[in-house]
Image: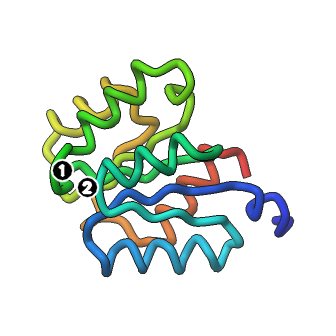
Amino acid sequence: MEQNQTSQKTILIVEDDTFMGSLLERKFKQKNFQILRAMNVDEARKFVESGPISLMLLDIILPGTDGITFLKELQLNPQFKNIPVIITSNLGKEEEIEKGIAEGAKDYIVKAHTTPGEIVEKVEKILGI
């Protein structure tokens, strides 16, 4: 894989768990992605509005506005609805997964069942890298 192919891709990690966010950030930086991190939807919204985002990893359980509500908001905005979103959550019930996909997520990853390396692989697949 060419380095500059991923270094031009910006991943927004919306995750309030500092440990998990740091783990994902390290994994993506090893693959030369540009990383933005948000602890909540308000921070994520500022990143989305200020620059091109190649893909967003979005937790569901966040302080304030939850991830599904933010996903719906993105889908209603023509400027942002084409940003691929992968939900990353520990909520793994079938109906939660189906709801996330129905709201426009490209994939739904249950964090407890997936390694950070596998998350990077899924992102690369969705971005066609």
Q: Secondary structure at mark 1?
A: loop
Q: Amino acid at mark 2?
A: Ser
Of badges 2 and 1, the one in the foreground is 2
Element carrying mark 2:
strand
Left or right position of 46 against 62? right
Mark 2 neighbour density, 10 Å: few (under 14) some (14–19) many (20 or more): many
90 or 113, which lies in front?
90
Question: Which label sits on residue 89?
Answer: 2
Measured along the vertical axis of the image, is residue 89 above or below residue 76? below
Q: In 3D space, how far apart are the residues under numbered discs 2 and 1 (Cα atoms)?
A: 7 Å
**Where, quadrant-wise, is the N terminus in this rendering?**
bottom right
Which three-letter amino acid code belongs to the residue tagged 1?
Answer: Gly
* Residue corresponding to mark 1: 92
Circle 1 packing at 10 Å, graded few (<14), some (14-19), many (20+), is: some
Asked if residue 98 can be seen in this view, the reply is yes
The front one of 34 and 98 is 34
Q: Does residue 121 appear left or right of residue 59 in this picture?
A: right
Image spot of residue 72 (x, y percent): 31, 27
Q: Do residues under tags 2 and 1 come within 8 Å of each other at their CB atoms? A: yes
Q: Is residue 80 above or below residue 42?
A: above
Question: Against 20, is 79 above or below?
Answer: above
Where on the picture, by quarter, is residue 110? bottom left
Numbered disc total: 2
Whether residue 109 can be seen here: no
Q: Residue at x 50, y 56 (%)?
A: 12
> Where's residue 93, x and y in %?
13, 44
Q: Residue at x 63, y 54 (%)?
A: 124
Colouring scheme applied when the structure was drawn: rainbow
Question: Quick check: 71 left or right of 56?
Answer: left
